[in-house]
Image (spheres, helix red, strand yellow):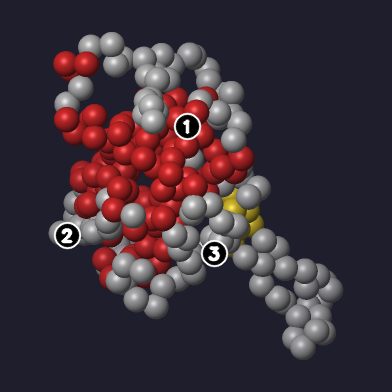
Amino acid sequence: RASTQLSVADTNNEDDITPSMRERRNFLVTATAATAAAILAPVPAYASGGATAGKYTTIPIAKRRYYGRVQEAVHEFLLMAPAVIAGDLNDPLIQDFFDVTKTVVVPGKKKDINGICTKKDGDCKSTTIYDSRYNDMKTTMYLLGNAFRINQQKAPDNLPTVQASKKFFKEMDTFERKVLNKEKKKVKKAPAEIYADALDILDVYLDLVELPPTDSGHYDKEFSTLVGETSRIT
C-alpha cells in the first residue's frame, strides 16, 4: 500500500532532513491509524485554578492541577494529525480544537440551597465559562512548566520548560491563524509543516515536565481534566 507523505514547502532537499526530523514526520503518517480508533466524545475541561498569587506552585501540586488538562490537550492535538495530513483545515477535529465555545474551562456551580434561591438579587443561575482547547492548553502548559524550577529567583522565561512551551505556542499560533483565516501576512510554511514542527517541540516540552512522548501510545485515550488526586501519570 502506498504510504502517505506530508506535503511541505521545504522538503525539496532531502539531504537536509535529519533522521530525527524524518522520524517525526513518519509518525504523523502512522498517527492516522492510531488516532482513528481514539476519536470519542470530548471530556469537559474543568479548570483547577491558577497558581497561588505571588508564589510558585510546587511540582507535585502543579502535576495534580495540570497533568490531566495538558494530557487531554495533547490527546486532542494528536487527533488532528489525519486531517492535517489530508490538508483539510475545516475538519471538525481541527475547528473544535480552536473553537472558543467548545471547551468548558470553568463549570457552572449551583448557587441555590436545596432548590431554593437565597440570594438577594434572586440570581442563582450557574455560569459556565468556555474557551478553546488550545487556549486552555497554552495556560496549563505554561503553569505546569513554570513549576519545574530549582529556585524562585529564576525568571520564568529562563526556564527550559517555559521556553519550550513558548516555542510550541509560536508555531501553533501560526497554525491557528491559518485555520481561522486570520493571517495578517502569508506564511510560506504549509500547515502540515507547521504542525510537524510543533510536534517536535511538544515532545521536548513533555520530556521536560516528565510526561511520555507523543508517539508512546499514552495519548490514545481521553484524560480527566478534573484536579487529580495524585501527581502520577494516569
Residue lying furthest bottom: 114
Q: Residues within 10 Å of mark 1 (few under 14, many from 20)?
A: many
Q: Earlier in the sequence, mark 1 or mark 2?
A: 1
Task: Residue type at mark 3: give it.
Answer: Tyr
Q: Position of residue 61 (x, y in %)?
A: 33, 70
Residue sitting at x 41%, y 14%? 188
Task: Residue type at mark 2: give it.
Answer: Asn
Residue under label 2? 151
Residue under label 1? 84
Q: Nearer the viewer, mark 1 or mark 3?
A: 1
**Which quadrant would the N terminus be assigned to in this image?**
top left
Residue under label 3? 46
Q: CA distance from mark 1 to mark 3?
A: 27 Å
Mark 3: secondary structure: loop
Q: Residues within 10 Å of mark 2 (few under 14, many from 20)?
A: few
Residue sitting at x 22%, y 52%? 208
Q: CA distance from mark 2 to mark 3?
A: 30 Å
Residue sitting at x 30%, y 71%? 232
In the picture, measured across the screen, residue 27 lies left or right of residue 20, that is: right
Q: Position of residue 204 (x, y in %)?
A: 24, 44
Q: Which numbered disc covers residue 8? A: none
Q: Earlier in the sequence, mark 1 or mark 3?
A: 3
- Asked if disc 1 and disc 3 are in contact, CB closer than 8 Å, the reply is no
Q: Nearer the viewer, mark 2 or mark 3?
A: 3
Above/below status of 58 relative to 77: below
Q: Earlier in the sequence, mark 2 or mark 3?
A: 3
In the picture, measured across the screen, residue 153 lies left or right of residue 142, that is: left
